[in-house]
Amino acid sequence: MTKKKLFIIAMTSGLLMCLAWADVMLLSPLTLVAFVPLLWVEDYILHNNENKQFSSGAVFRYTYLPFLLFAFVNTWWIMEATWIALVVPFFEACFMALVFQVYHFAKKVAGNTKGAYFYLPLFWILFEYIQFNWDVNFPWLNLGNSFVSYPFLIQWYSVLGMEGGSLWILLSNIFIYLWLIKKEKYKPFDFEIENSGKRLFRQKQEGVFAILILLLPILWSVYLWYSYKEDNIGKIDVVVVQPNLDPYNEQYSFSPLQVARLTQKLATPLMDDNVDYVLMPESSIQEYAWEEEIDSVESIVVLNRWANRWKKAEIIAGLSSKRMLPKGEKTPAARKLMGSTDEYYESCNIAVDVPRSGSFDDYQIHHKTILTVGVEKMPFKKYLSFVENFALDLGGTIGTLGIDTNTVIFTSKTSGNKVCAAICYESVDVNYIRKFINKGAQAIFIMTNDGWWGDTKGYKHHFSFAKLRAIENRRYIARSANTGISGFINPKGQVIQKTEYWEEDAIKQSIPLQNSLSFFAKHGDIIMKPFSFFAVLLLIYSLVMNKIKKQNKG
């Protein structure tokens, strides 16, 4: 086998992953076999290196380009906002290839045992756990996201969460690979005649395992699909507004009152006394307001007067804000107040529930807490303070923003209904959304501005990820996008109604409230932490055993 052929085989995985994630991932079942070529390449390097023709980092090199292709095809759209985002696919590919290299190392130390193939899910899920929890949090490409177009197949996300999907993909690839190679002694795709009876039995056995790992989650999902029952505790009528202001040419050039009037114009034909909420997108209120004076913001006052023409309508909208910190207090997001030596404030991205009373004491504010890296949060700022200078100006505030220390949900003063308002990137974080649900949120509102990425797959993926949050938490979702796609999604992940891209629009839906907690909402992700823990132990064990082996040889 020449190195050129190995490279071609490895690139097949990259092509399969790109096809699987094309558009809105209509070919996502390809992920169930997409890693098979990479598993073959890694195996070949492990078992055909007697003459040291492959270096110690060969697996990294052969897997890097397939992952770079996959990452670039699915994140290039970030560069619509800034060319600096060009580094994203290179770093993502580096981490993915590193997972395969570490897997190769641990497998080599373990020896030629079939169980070592299952080290890959441990290390890969550790990587996805890190993607959620470190300063450069970017879980966009986590494998479990790929089944957004097939909610019928993944109802069990309500139990295992999105990470269960990642595990399913990895295990399917491994079992299918083991079935294909049919090996006693490593000879890839070697169909020897000798021991044919034993080989045939083993082939059938591994084939059965491959079929079971593919079918059992699907059968489980079918059962959950038909057995799921919604709570019957009442409904809310929600009007979702999509102003469709071009963030590059219109949104921040229109006056705040012009934007407020546009919202009124779009929503008014749908308003009546049954409307509970008017949901507006991220940054839809244009004033850069002090939170201590939020009840006097002109756009909010105008919109509140308008909403009070109906019996119970409340407005939930997004804006950029400033909030004062207690005198002498300095947070990672603190900015010095001009003219003061010991007073600081924070800039924030907030969702505000505007009370019908208009009273300051009745306002409810949620501060965006899962911040967009490079725009609202400067990674490793504690150690690399200069990175603040590279913040991307996407309108409104830039640099590290202030966040909530506690999860905030909105409780209606009129009806007592409880909803959460996730802002943009927060809707990608599976464990953050479930915190809202555990605080009592009966429906999920998402407000975003996807116009920065243009007509790319970015806004399509972002909308589709909301289906996963609906399934995981068994909640209805109302989504308002300035541009992109606005819509309503039911607890099974089905889109009930949606807008078209790049059109002014408003839509209305009556959505049932839910109180019951799914297993995932109650217990969180039961895969990532234990898998990550054992992955770290396995890596430490492999390092120690490798050192012992070298000493024994010496």
Image (tube, rainbow, N blue to C red):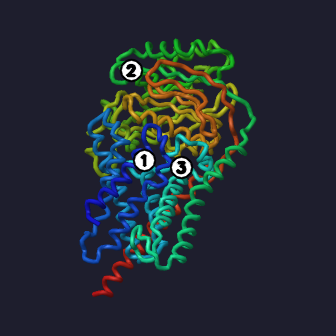
Q: Residue at x 46, y 71 (%)?
A: 116
Question: How many residues crowd mark 1 within 10 Å: few (<14), some (14–19), many (20+)?
Answer: some
Could you say which quadrant of the image residue 46 lies in? bottom left
Q: Which residue is mark 1?
A: 141
Q: Is residue 181 above or below residue 232?
A: below
> Does the image show residue 176?
yes
Give the amino acid type for the residue marked by disc 1 in the picture.
Answer: Leu
- The reply to whether callout 1 and callout 2 are in contact (CB within 8 Å) is no
**Residue 406: x and y, percent?**
54, 43
Q: Which residue is mark 3?
A: 162
Q: Which residue is mark 2?
A: 251
Which sits earlier in the primary sequence, circle 3 or circle 1? 1
**Residue 442: x and y, percent?**
65, 37
Question: Residue furthest toward the front?
Answer: 193
CA gap between label 2 and label 3 equals 34 Å
**Quadrant of the drawing holding the C terminus:** bottom left
Give the amino acid type for the residue marked by disc 3 in the picture.
Answer: Met
Disc tally is 3
Give the amino acid type for the residue marked by disc 2 in the picture.
Answer: Gln
Q: Secondary structure at mark 1?
A: helix
Q: Residue at x 59, y 49 (%)?
A: 157
